Image (spheres, rainbow, N blue to C red):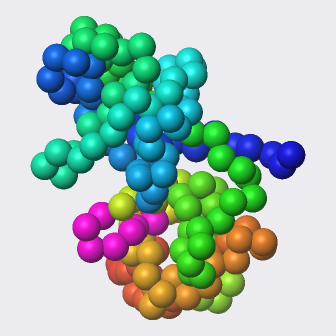
Amino acid sequence: MGEFVDVLVGTIGRAHGLRGEVTVHVRTDEPERRFAPGAGLTVGGRPRTVASARWHSGTLLLALDKVTDRTGAEALRGQELWASVPADEAPADEGEYWDRQLVGLGVLDASGATVGTITEVLHLPAHDTLVVRTPSGERLVPFVGALVPVVDLAAGHVQVADVEGLLTDTEDA
């Protein structure tokens, strides 16, 4: 059997209702898969099973086994939800990546020089955005083909286009 990695798939928010449901700040592209009834998750270091999941006004509501009332739900507030997934699993569509594949990759400028490291992927309404740590601070790079034309997982880097102000302040140039 192959290797597995733990992946952050959400964070528990406030309790919802009286029967133990919680709101979830979703951190996965596959909520219907990761939060399917019967799916195993780790919450606060303890294994849990998803009892039910439903969408309500754009918010995921989750019920976990052994959490049957509002008090139990409130006690979970702020806890991270982790799923164990095969380490070599990849998205089905070419050109799509999971956050775990991108975080930690080096960032090269258009000339091939290392300029930073991806520390996070933000899922914004318009498009995903890479948070890049550079010597001069954090930079936000829209994760679109025109600005990030090269993603080389095997080599461990992405390469960004030569766009003024993308990785440096224009007065630094």
132 vs 74, nearest the viewer: 74
Relative to residue 142, is residue 43 drawn left or right?
right
Rendering quarter of residue 15: top left
Q: Quadrant of the C terminus?
A: bottom left
79 vs 106, nearest the viewer: 79
32 vs 104, nearest the viewer: 32
Which residue is rendered at x = 46% and y = 56% of the image? Answer: 30
- Residue 156 lies, in percent from the top left, at 73, 68
- Residue 45 lies, in percent from the top left, at 57, 20
- Residue 3 lies, in percent from the top left, at 81, 46
**Can I make out residue 68 in this image?**
yes
Residue extending furthest top?
71
Relative to residue 19, is residue 62 drawn left or right?
right
Decide whether residue 74 is among the magenta residues: no
Which residue is rendered at x = 55% and y = 28% of the image? Answer: 42
- Residue 93 lies, in percent from the top left, at 56, 78
81 shown above or below 119: above
Which residue is rendered at x = 22% and y = 18% of the image? Answer: 19
**Can I make out residue 115 in this image?**
no
Relative to residue 89, is residue 8 drawn left or right?
left
Which residue is rendered at x = 43% and y = 20% of the image? Answer: 65
151 shown above or below 51: below
The mark total stands at 0
Which segment is the magenta one? 124-131
Rendering quarter of residue 70: top left
Residue extending furthest right?
1
